[in-house]
Image (spheres, grey):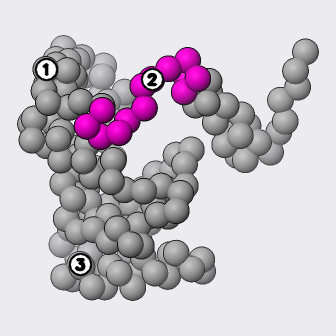
Amino acid sequence: MDHRLSLLKDWLKTVVEQPVVELSNASADASFRRYFRVHTANTTFVVMDAPPDKEPLDRFIAVDRALLEQGVHAPKIISQNLEQGFLLLEDLGNQLYLPRLPDNPEQLYADAIKALIKIQLGSIDQQSFDLPDYSKALLWSELELFEHWYVQQHLGKTLVNF
């Protein structure tokens, strides 16, 4: 078992009131963060593992609070351990828009547009959270993640330049 997972399990014992029945992968992305779904007898949570030296939590927490203050559906932070890089979050479920889209496109698009409008009209200012401008350089940096995290890491392949 990896060291961070062991630390995470120990921390969960101190912040979740009921015994953890199961800890399962909730999602993965092209970062050092990991997300696990925490199952107890009565409820589920999501726990984020973000190594502090690689993925500080300050920006996430600030943006999450701002979204919630604007009435945008974002996960509530239930408990945090910034020193170890752990957040216990409300579980918003794992239902994606795409499979539900054919059944109710008008409502789903309307909900998404309302949320975007709240964000645009609200007080979220990228400078107040020290968020970088979304520039051409940042776009290219994110596109390079495709090659590193997906092609090389998950497919075990190397892209060839022509």
Please report the residue visible at 84 percent of the width from the left and 36 percent of the height from the top.
Answer: 158
Please report the residue visible at 25 percent of the width from the left and 42 percent of the height from the top.
Answer: 63
State the quadrant of the N terminus.
bottom right
Foreground mark, 3 or 2, reads: 2
Check disc 2: other Cα within 10 Å, few if <14, some if 14-19, many if 20+. Answer: few
Q: Is residue 60 above or below residue 123?
A: below
Residue 38 position, x and y percent, is 33, 69
Residue 52 position, x and y percent, is 46, 64
**In terms of depth relative to the viewer, which is nearer, 42 or 25?**
25
Q: In this view, does 112 lie above or below 63?
A: above
Q: Which amino acid does label 1 sit on?
A: Leu
Residue range (magenta)? 127-139
Of mark 3 and mark 1, the one earlier in the sequence is 3
Check disc 1: other Cα within 10 Å, few if <14, some if 14-19, many if 20+. Answer: few
Q: Name the residue under label 2.
A: 134
Q: How far apart are marks 3 and 1 (CA)?
A: 36 Å
**Side of 36 where 43 appears, left or right:** left
